[in-house]
Amino acid sequence: MGVVTELHDAYGFEANVGVIKAEQCTLVGVQPKVVLFHSRGCGPCAERKMQLAQLAEAHGNIEFYTLKTEGNKSFWGALGIDGVPTVLCLHRDGRLTKIVGGPLSQVERAITDLA
């Protein structure tokens, strides 16, 4: 399976992914990013996490991350994330695509758009 890096807090997010302000992102590095926001004990989150690992394997030109809700609620609110699982796709040009729940095909389309 592909590499998906677990982030632990807002500092890790900003150090590895980027800074988000006003629906725009300044990325760290040049690779587009995909971040799964999830919660422990959430069945759909666990399933999406496994799917993300498979997608990471197929898309080596994109960096994949996960971040748990536990201990990060204020950071999530600042990003406008209010439900899990949420996938946030961060484009090279700073655009954001947010997918809350939804079918895997929707996530796949968003990731294909990043490449």
Image (cartoon, helix red, strand yellow):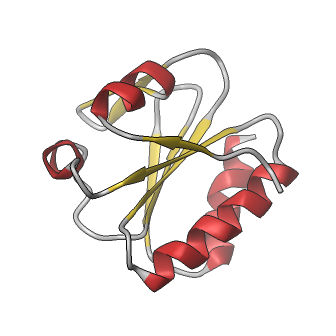
Q: Which x, y percent locates residue 111?
A: 67, 53
Residue plotted at (66% across, 61% down): 52
Residue plotted at (64% across, 76% down): 104
Residue plotted at (74% across, 44% down): 3
Image vertical order of residue 26 relative to residue 55, above or below: above
Question: From the viewer's perspective, is 9 left or right of 51?
Answer: left
Image vertical order of residue 90 relative to residue 54, above or below: above
Of 112 and 11, which appears nearest the observer? 11
Q: Which x, y percent locates residue 78?
A: 17, 42
* Quadrant for the C terminus in the image: top right
* Quadrant for the N terminus in the image: bottom right
Question: From the viewer's perspective, is 14 left or right of 17?
Answer: left
- Write down the quadrant of residue 48 in the picture: bottom right
Q: Which x, y percent locates residue 8?
A: 38, 40
- Write down the quadrant of residue 25 in the picture: top left
Image mark count: 0
Question: From the viewer's perspective, is 25 left or right of 21?
Answer: right
Image vertical order of residue 112 relative to residue 6, above or below: below
Of 75 and 79, which appears nearest the observer? 75
